[in-house]
Image (cartoon, helix red, strand yellow):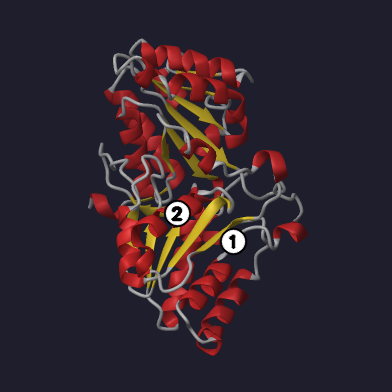
Amino acid sequence: MADTRLMNVAAALREATDLCMARDPRVFVMGEGVADPKAIFGTTAGLLERYGRDRVMEMPIAENGFTGVAIGAALLGRRPLIIHQRVDFALLALEQLVNNAAKTRYVSNGRHRVPLVVRMIVGRGWGQGPAHSQSLDALFAMIPGLKLVLPTTAREAKGQLIAAIEDDDPVMMIEHRWVHYATGHVPEGYYTVPLDGPRRVREGGDVTIVATSYMLLEALRAADTLAQAGVQADVIDMAVPRPFRPQLVVDSVRRTGRLLCIDTGFRLFGIGAELVASVAEQALGSLAKPPVRLGLPDHPTPSTRALLTDFYPTALSIIDAAAELADVPVERIAGPREALAVELSKLPMDVPHPTFRGPF
């Protein structure tokens, strides 16, 4: 059956791109490494051989320039898909993305659209440090005119990318490197997943946990451990931060009275901060305790394992924060937490859990 087919997120993204290119000759791919044998972690593998260099275009190190080319092509009716091997490289194209792609529909009163998709990858781990591992989700989420997608599961990643390529407005898709090798059931054929906000992935009534990107996988691991102590978490994937539609989170907090947000990016000025503000505005009276945010501390990413130990939130820090929010006695959570800590201690901090392991 179609719904029993297993594949990882990287393969799902490649399949989505292939289906869109086969269906619509206006779709083309461009970026640094799209025609390389490693094929952007396998996500563009085989596309050059199938569609040729006119539709799979290897680019020089000139991010602002080829982003401008893509925007121009989109204005003329094409549907470009740009891929940056790191989010950090897209910073060189911010002027084009913010001043041109995001504003064109508005300044033309809807007469012109920019159907552009920009895939960007967060390169956590392997000593990549300050310049190659930044999670800058909030930077793109704050720009009116851009949409932002943070895929986590293979099924959603495929449908989200197809929906993004179909969209008439610019869509930024930020993929955490460790998510690429998370596997799941993926239907065959062409389908879309709406780019319409958060989605519930686990139902519970004791505490609301909202996570973005790879941190959703850590949150689900934490929720399994919390359940062993009798705490049922309502886990929500903030899969589409822009357009920002927090109603699902607000409704959940009205039931649980407790909110924990976990960002892959910085804690300060992050997506979690915006969610906390929205809940405070709409459901302040429902909060039994002040909301809690987890995220990166206020300094650049270290390169060494020793310094990374306390840099990233983990399933353990999520458990601790959620248990405190839910007033769970320490002795009740200690056993399940220790069992998970022993499992996690077998791996260094700069490589993913074996479930999500992949090449550099």
Q: Amino acid at mark 2?
A: Ala
* Camera-nearest residue between 279 and 105: 279
Distance (Cα) linking label 2 and label 1:
21 Å
Residue that lies at the very extreme toward the bottom in this rendered image: 331
The C terminus is located in which quarter?
Answer: top right
> Which residue occupies the foreground of this view, 234 or 253?
253
Q: Nearer the viewer, residue 167 or 249?
A: 249
On screen, 314 above or below 360?
Answer: below
Name which residue lies at 59% across and 21% down. Answer: 63
Q: Position of residue 285 (x, y in %)?
A: 36, 67
Vertical placement of 301 versus 315: above or below?
Answer: above
For label 1, count other residues whose C-alpha is less than 10 Å away and answer few (under 14), some (14-19) or many (20+): some
| Amino acid at circle 1 | Pro
Mark yes or no: residue 114 visible: no
Mark 2 vs mark 1: in front: 2
Q: Which residue is mark 2?
A: 277
On the image, the x and y values in percent for residue 227 come to 41, 78
Residue 313's tag is 1
Q: Residue at x 53, y 49 (%)?
A: 270
Query: What is the count of numbered marks?
Result: 2
Is 60 left or right of 328, judged from the image as shown? Answer: right
Sooner in the amino-acid sequence: mark 2 or mark 1: 2
Q: Is residue 20 above or below residue 58?
A: below
